[in-house]
Structure formats: C-alpha cells, structure tokens
C-alpha cells in the first residue's frame, strides 16, 4: 500500500544547479507525466476541498494553471488565472512582488472575482512566498475571501509558508 504523499514526493525530480549554480530545482513535470501520480496528486486536493464551500479556484501562472484547472473541473468550480504581467487582455489589477533581483508583478482581470466569493488559491511551490502573497493581495483587493493558499511543494527553509501563514492565510502543501 502506498502513501500518496510519499508517492508524489519520490516522483518529484530534483534538478541540481538549475536555474543557477547552488539551486536545486523541484521539477513537477514527472508527476504530471505519469498518469498515476497525476491522479494521486489531484485526488489529494479533491479530498481536501470537496464539500468545502468554494466558488472559484485561482491558479498562478504557469504551473498553478495545470493543477488548478483540473482541480476546479473536478470540484465543479470555475477557474481564474493569476497571470504574469502583460498577458491578460481585459481590464486588470496588478500587485508587485520582489524577486532576488528586482520586481515582478501578477495580474488578474478586474471582473474575475465578485466580492464575497470564496476562492482557493493554488500554485506548484512555495519558496519565499512572494508570489502567493501577491496573488492573495490581488484577490483580496477584488473582494474575494481567500479560503486557503495551496501548493504541491513547500520549501520551508525559505520561510515562504510561514510568511503566508503570518499574513493571516491558511496554507496547505502536499509535501516539503
Ligand atoms: C515559481 C513557482 C512559484 C514561485 C514560487 O514560479 O512556480 O510560482 O516561483 O516562488 P516564491 O514563493 O519565492 O514566490 P516562477 O516565478 O519561477 O515562474 P514560472 O511559473 O514562469 O516558471
Ligand atoms: N521549483 C519550481 N519553482 C520554484 C522553485 C523550484 O524548485 N524554486 C523557486 N521557484
């Protein structure tokens, strides 16, 4: 009998020295490529969120789209994208966050959430937490109730999940 979390953890690929020397990149593509681990992964999220009162899943560009859209479909919810700057065609709101060198920003369509809607925010990984915090601020500016911020992987040594929790959000990750 396999433990689902262990199963996912062992299929995630650690790529040394990518994107630069000294960094070990957690690559989820093998989890998506293997039909069994892809299903186990999505089912872990489905079991957590089925029966919870949710209106939407918001997925973060780009890997949050892959898990977020399938999860939204399985939960009979709509999906809204949190995109990197300059990609969305309609009226947008933006939030900046800091990267190691400089800033980046995420955007959402102004009509993607209605005030009071209960939203699950999802991405593949929490490193510094900057991306999920910016995405959560965007959703909150649009009046959303961010029910939880979820990811497949937490890198706790970078303090991101703590930062997101300290901001008042509930955080769930499958593995670290
Ligand atoms: C990665 C990852 C998260 C974010 C986590 O995406 O998919 O979105 O970084 O880092 P943080 O917790 O420090 O914010 P990246 O910004 O590399 O963009 P990509 O999806 O375009 O690869
Ligand atoms: N994997 C994916 N995204 C990331 C990582 C990683 O290891 N580190 C920071 N963002």
Image (cartoon, rainbow, N blue to C red):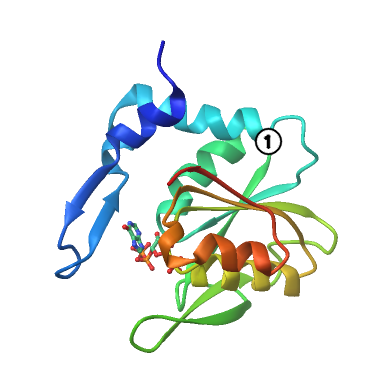
User: Disc 1 marks which residue?
Assistant: 49
- Residue at 25% x, 57% y: name it: 25
- Given residues 122 and 125, the one toward you in this image is 125
- The extreme right residue here reads 116
Give the vertical position of 97 relative to 21 (above or below). Answer: below
- The extreme bottom residue here reads 102
**Residue 57 horizontal side relative to residue 4, left or right:** right
Residue 98 at least partly seen: yes
SS class of the residue under badge 1?
A: helix
Quadrant into which the N terminus falls? top left
Give the vertical position of 18 relative to 15 (above or below). Answer: below
Residue 126 at least partly seen: no
- Given residues 41 and 54, the one toward you in this image is 41
- Given residues 58 and 102, the one toward you in this image is 102
> Where is ligand 2, by quadrant?
bottom left
Dot 1: few (<14), some (14–19), or many (≥20) neighbours within 10 Å? some
Give the vertical position of 40 relative to 172 (above or below). Answer: above
Give the vertical position of 137 relative to 47 (above or below). Answer: below
Q: x, y percentage for residue 84?
A: 45, 72
- The extreme front residue here reads 157
């Amino acid at each position: 009998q396999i433990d689902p979390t262990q199963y996912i953890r062992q299929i995630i690929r650690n790529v040394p020295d990518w994107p630069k020397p000294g960094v070990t990149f957690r690559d989820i593509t093998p989890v998506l490529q293997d039909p069994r681990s892809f299903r186990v992964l999505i089912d872990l999220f489905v079991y957590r969120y089925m029966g919870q009162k949710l209106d939407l899943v918001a997925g973060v560009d780009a890997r949050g789209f892959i898990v977020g859209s399938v999860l939204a479909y399985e939960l009979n919810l709509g999906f809204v994208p949190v995109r990197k700057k300059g990609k969305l065609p309609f009226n947008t709101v933006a939030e900046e966050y800091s990267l190691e060198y400089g800033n980046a920003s995420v955007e959402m369509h102004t009509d993607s959430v209605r005030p009071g809607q209960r939203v699950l925010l999802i991405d593949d990984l929490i490193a510094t937490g900057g991306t999920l915090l910016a995405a959560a601020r965007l959703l909150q500016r649009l009046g959303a109730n961010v029910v939880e911020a979820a990811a497949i992987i937490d890198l706790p040594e970078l303090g991101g999940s703590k930062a997101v929790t300290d901001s008042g959000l509930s955080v769930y990750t499958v593995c670290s």
